[in-house]
Amino acid sequence: MILPDYQTFETQFKEGFNQVIYTRLAADLDTPVSLLLKLTAASKDAFILESVTGGEVRGRYSIIGMKPDLVWKCHGKKSYINRSARFDDEAFEEQNVPPLDAFRALLKESYINLPDGLPQAAAGLFGYHGYDMIRLVEHLPNVNPDPLGLPDALFLRPSVVA
């Protein structure tokens, strides 16, 4: 069964609420990695996050995300957003506010009141803030080389979470 039903979804959509469409599937014969490979077919911008309890013996949960509709990144004192990430992975636009303010606004925009029974990680922004993000709040010397040129922060908003 797919939830919510169409009428509930339509009402919430017309009121401007972000929401999830979900179903439950039994997948106890698959491993998290095999599901990642089956679901994403090695597509770009897919990820798997896993937690482990009791050492490396037993996993508590795994999260697979794919097909982001939005990508946010930060380089130094500039942040960029791509609101067309599913169709054009180069469509980044520079944001005209400080990066941390832009990120706070994105968190607020992306908020979803999840239905009861869904895990907290059923929707959201997934990514990282790197060490150099501290330079946005604290004055530190910037003497480390950056041979890879990776973003200081990068977050995806997957349209599919499994």
Image: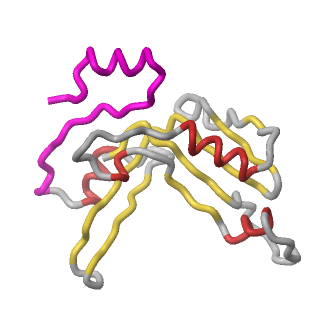
Is residue 19 positioned above or below 71 on the image?
Answer: above
Q: Is 118 positioned to the left or the right of 150 in the image? A: left
Is residue 55 positioned above or below 112 on the image?
Answer: below
Determine the residue positioned at 78% across, 65% down.
137
Chief secondary structure of the magenta portion: loop
> Any magenta on residue 26?
yes
Bounds of the magenta segment: 1-29
> Any magenta on residue 102?
no
User: 12 or 81: nearer the eye?
Assistant: 12
Q: Residue 20 location in percent, x, y?
A: 35, 34
Q: Residue 66 location in percent, x, y?
A: 42, 44
Determine the residue positioned at 43% across, 36% down.
159
Determine the residue positioned at 52% across, 34% down.
69
User: 116 or 154: nearer the eye?
Assistant: 116
Query: Please, which colouring scheme is shown?
Result: secondary structure
Q: Residue 82 location in percent, x, y?
A: 64, 36
Is residue 129 positioned above or below 158 on the image?
Answer: below
Q: Is 19 positioned to the left or the right of 34 in the image? A: right
Q: Residue 68 location in percent, x, y?
A: 49, 39
Which part of the image, by quadrant, shows the N terminus?
Answer: top left
Q: Tag count in the figure?
A: 0
